[in-house]
């Protein structure tokens, strides 16, 4: 698979089979992803890979919190600005329409949307999960580096025939994740990433992208 194929075939997959991902594949991907760019080579990412019984315990504990109606953990960073301006507001709304529309969930059915969102805590059935942390003392440029690392991981997973889904949602249950991975106090959980083989019987939901002219400006003769 070439780079263009990896980029164009990558998407947020939200249905996985229970086929196990070999550890040697994950090690190969993460070893290569360590070559991701970072300012002054800080390499600010801290990744925890969870599989098997530890992941089953995490899914169970998170599911119990959802069922009990536990409040989310105190946020350590702002996932979205409180008031998204245009065009970001419209793009987010369009994503919701596409995502839940494909599941047959009407716009006003908030309960059904919450049920669909709760699949996050099962990692959409994936047998492997990566949790990415960053030191709380680092700044915005280092958060950008972490984003480039995650993208590199996802593209390398595609090269291995795997799919993924990054999930900032896990930051809402960061304390439950911490019970399993035991990160040092100076680290903040940025996101989780479900990893596995796509369940192709579940159907493909692929969200649109803005046209090139809307996001790119060429300055030339």
Image: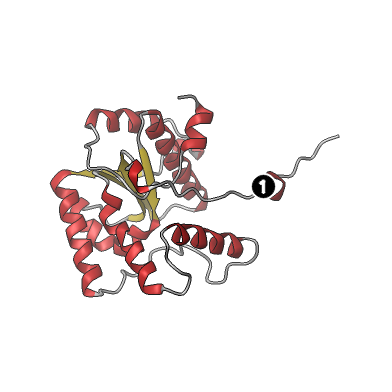
Q: How many numbered callouts?
A: 1
Helix, strand or loop at disc 1?
A: loop
Question: Residue at the spot x=44%, y=61% of the render?
Answer: 100
Outermost residue on the left side: it is 53
Q: Is residue 51 left or right of residue 156?
A: left
User: From where the camera sits, is residue 206 visible?
Assistant: yes
Residue 75 versus residue 42: which sits nearer the camera? 75
The image shows residue 206 at horizontal and vertical percentages of 49, 48
Q: Quadrant of residue 24?
A: top left
Q: Where 80 sits versus 182, above or below? A: below
The image shows residue 57 at horizontal and vertical percentages of 15, 55
Outermost residue on the right side: it is 221
- Colouring chosen for the image of the structure: secondary structure
User: Pointer 1: what residue?
Assistant: 211
- Quarter of the figure with the N terminus: top left
Crowd class of label 1 (few under 14; some 14 to 19; many from 20; radius 10 Å): few
Question: Residue at the spot x=31%, y=63% of the render?
Answer: 118
Q: Where 98 sits versus 157, above or below? A: below
Q: Quadrant of residue 195?
A: top left
User: From where the camera sits, is residue 34 visible?
Assistant: no
- Quarter of the figure with the C terminus: top right
Residue 152 versus residue 133: which sits nearer the camera? 152
Residue 200 versus residue 148: which sits nearer the camera? 200
Question: Residue at the spot x=30%, y=58% of the render?
Answer: 119
Q: Where 109 sits versus 76, above or below? A: below
Q: Where 204 sits versus 118, above or below? A: above
The image shows residue 143 at horizontal and vertical percentages of 47, 50
Q: Is residue 88 left or right of residue 120?
A: right
The image shows residue 121 at horizontal and vertical percentages of 28, 58
Q: Quadrant of residue 18?
A: top left
């Amino acid at each position: 698979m070439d780079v263009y194929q990896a980029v164009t075939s990558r998407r947020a997959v939200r249905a996985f089979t229970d086929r196990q991902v070999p550890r040697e594949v994950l090690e190969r991907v993460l070893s290569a992803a360590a070559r991701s760019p970072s300012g002054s080579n800080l390499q600010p990412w801290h990744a925890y890979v969870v599989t098997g019984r530890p992941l089953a315990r995490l899914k169970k504990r998170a599911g119990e919190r959802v069922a009990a109606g536990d409040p989310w953990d105190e946020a350590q960073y702002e996932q979205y600005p409180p008031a998204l301006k245009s065009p970001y507001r419209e793009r987010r709304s369009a994503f919701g329409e596409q995502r839940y529309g494909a599941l047959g969930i009407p716009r006003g059915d908030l309960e059904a949307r919450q049920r669909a969102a709760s699949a996050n805590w099962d990692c959409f059935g994936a047998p492997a999960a990566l949790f990415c942390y960053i030191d709380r003392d680092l700044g915005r440029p280092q958060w950008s580096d972490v984003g480039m690392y995650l993208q590199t991981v996802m593209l390398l997973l595609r090269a291995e025939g795997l799919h993924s889904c990054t999930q900032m949602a896990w930051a809402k249950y960061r304390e439950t994740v911490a019970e399993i991975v035991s990160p040092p106090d100076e680290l903040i959980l940025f996101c989780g990433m479900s990893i596995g083989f796509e369940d192709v019987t579940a159907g493909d939901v692929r969200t649109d992208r803005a046209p090139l002219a809307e996001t790119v400006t060429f300055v030339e003769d």
